[in-house]
Image (cartoon, rainbow, N blue to C red):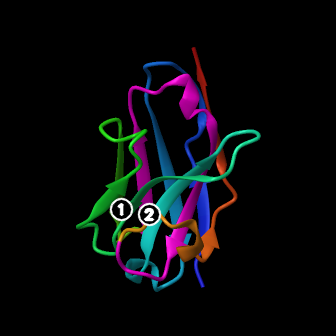
C-alpha cells in the first residue's frame, strides 16, 4: 500500500517555474516506478513524466520534454517534478502516481496508487 500527497502547485506567469513534490508513505516506495500525470478541465488525464524505481530511467511526454525534469529520492520517499518555461497549456491538476512495475511507464492503467492532485495555473 502506498499513499501519495502532492504539494507545490500554484499560480505562475508564462515562462516561469514551479516545483511539484510528492511525498509517499509505505516501506515499499523504492520498488515502485513513479509518474506524474495531469488533467485539464474537459480533457482526459494525460501522462507527463515517469521515473523507474532506481531513478536510472526517465520518460517524458513530448509536450514537456526539455522543460520538465522528474527526480526521486528513495531515502526520503519523495518524487519531484521541476517545471520550467511553463506555458498556459500546462495549466491542469497534476497527479502523482505509483506503479508496481519497476520501469518507467506512460500507461495510466499501470499505476495503482494516486494522489489527490495539486492545481497548477499558468497565466499568459
Q: Is residue 75 left or right of residue 95?
A: left
Q: Earlier in the sequence, mark 1 or mark 2?
A: 1
Disc 1 versus disc 2: distance between alpha carbons? 6 Å
Work out which quarter of the rendered image holds the N terminus and state it: bottom right
Given residues 94 and 44, the one toward you in this image is: 44
Residue at 23 percent across and 67 percent down: it is 56
Q: Which residue is mark 2?
A: 78
Work out which quarter of the rendered image holds the C terminus and state it: top right
Q: Which residue is mark 1?
A: 72
Q: Residue furthest top?
A: 124
Residue at 50 percent across and 46 percent down: it is 20
Q: Position of residue 105 (x, y in %)?
A: 42, 68
Q: Is residue 54 left or right of residue 120?
A: left
Q: Do residues under tags 1 and 2 come within 8 Å of each other at their CB atoms?
A: yes
| Span of residues in magenta | 77-103
Residue 96: which quarter of the image? bottom right
Placement of 24 over or under 102, stated as above or below = above
Q: Position of residue 103 (x, y in %)?
A: 35, 75
Amino acid at each position: 500500500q502506498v499513499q501519495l500527497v502532492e504539494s507545490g502547485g500554484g499560480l505562475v506567469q508564462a515562462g516561469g517555474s514551479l516545483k511539484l513534490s510528492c511525498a509517499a508513505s509505505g516501506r515499499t516506495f523504492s520498488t515502485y516506478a513513479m509518474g506524474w500525470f495531469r488533467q485539464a478541465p474537459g480533457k482526459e488525464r494525460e501522462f507527463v513524466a515517469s521515473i523507474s524505481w532506481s531513478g536510472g530511467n526517465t520518460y517524458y511526454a513530448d509536450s514537456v520534454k526539455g522543460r520538465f525534469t522528474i527526480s526521486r529520492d528513495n531515502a526520503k520517499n519523495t518524487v519531484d517534478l521541476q517545471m520550467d518555461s511553463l506555458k498556459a497549456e500546462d495549466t491542469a491538476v497534476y497527479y502523482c502516481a505509483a506503479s508496481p512495475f519497476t520501469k518507467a511507464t506512460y500507461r495510466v492503467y499501470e499505476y495503482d496508487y494516486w494522489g489527490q492532485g495539486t492545481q497548477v495555473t499558468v497565466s499568459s
